[in-house]
Amino acid sequence: MSGPSEDGAGPTEWGAAEVGVGPWEGPWPADPKYDPELLSGGDRRNVVDAYRYWRRDAVVADLDRRRHPFHVVIENLAHDANIGTIVRTANAFLAEAVHIVGRRRWNRRGAMVTDRYQHVHHHATAQAFADYAAGRGLAVIAVDNTPGAEPMETFALPRRCALLFGQEGTGLSPELRGTAQSALAIAQFGSTRSINVGVAAGIAMHAWVRQHADLAQRWQ
């Protein structure tokens, strides 16, 4: 089941004809963070109520003030459709940045336009990403159900870290896997060998949130 698009155009699968709010009623606010076009025409974007009518750059600036110090890294060898989903989830959990290693072009459909608010960086090679992580003091944690991986459920995630995910189907390349200091596996109990990389990324990000996030800062 999908949610509303960024502009809210058309009905959603939930059956709502419109999302968001209509034109601002009453005198307009003088604060420059508000967008005159949104005030006059309404705000149908897929944003939380606290950001209604705000300019996009004002929203990003406020998010930057509060971002969590974890990064998400996804390998892009074959135009993986899961990258958009991972970007959307990273936005929801307020990751500092998403990094795409390999191919520059990626399928943005699943991001639901959240990439407008989420910092997304590209690295052509595993070494380029490794240099970035080392320069910023990030602990690189591979999430990969390979032999020797520690259980994510009992692992103390570093506050400043990069969570590393491979291409759907093939997993992490040896080059990118070699940039990690630790490897974690998500506990599974069924017959399937692995879970979807977009789902795995969401589980890992939420594990970081459970250990480090200030829940008083969550949207109510």
Image: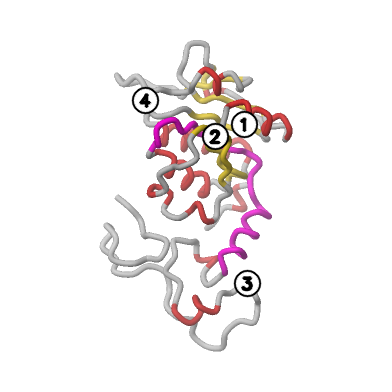
Residue at (58%, 44%) from the top-left corner? 95
> Circle 2 sits on which residue?
73
> Circle 1 sits on which residue?
129
Viewer-nearest of discs 1 and 2? 1
Q: Give the CA distance from mark 1 to mark 3.
A: 34 Å
> Circle 3 sits on which residue?
33
Element carrying mark 2: strand
Sequence-wise, which precedes: disc 1 or disc 3? 3
Determine the image quadrant of residue 57. Answer: bottom right
What kind of residue is marked 4? Gly
What kind of residue is marked 1? Phe
Sequence-wise, which precedes: disc 1 or disc 2? 2
Viewer-nearest of discs 3 and 4? 4
Dot 1 and dot 4 residues touching (CB under 8 Å): no
Residue 92, percent from left and from top:
51, 49
Viewer-nearest of discs 2 and 3? 2
Q: Which mark is residue 169?
A: 4
Residue 68, percent from left and from top:
63, 44
Residue at (29%, 19%) from the top-left corner? 191
Dot 1 and dot 3 residues touching (CB under 8 Å): no
Element carrying mark 3: loop
Q: Give the CA distance from mark 1 to mark 4.
A: 22 Å
Q: Which residues are magenta?
A: 55-80
Q: Give the CA distance from mark 2 to mark 3.
A: 31 Å
Above or below: residue 49 compared with residue 142: below
Check if residue 114 falls in the magenta segment. no
What kind of residue is marked 3? Lys
Looking at this view, name the residue that lies furthest to the top.
Answer: 147
Dot 1 and dot 2 residues touching (CB under 8 Å): yes
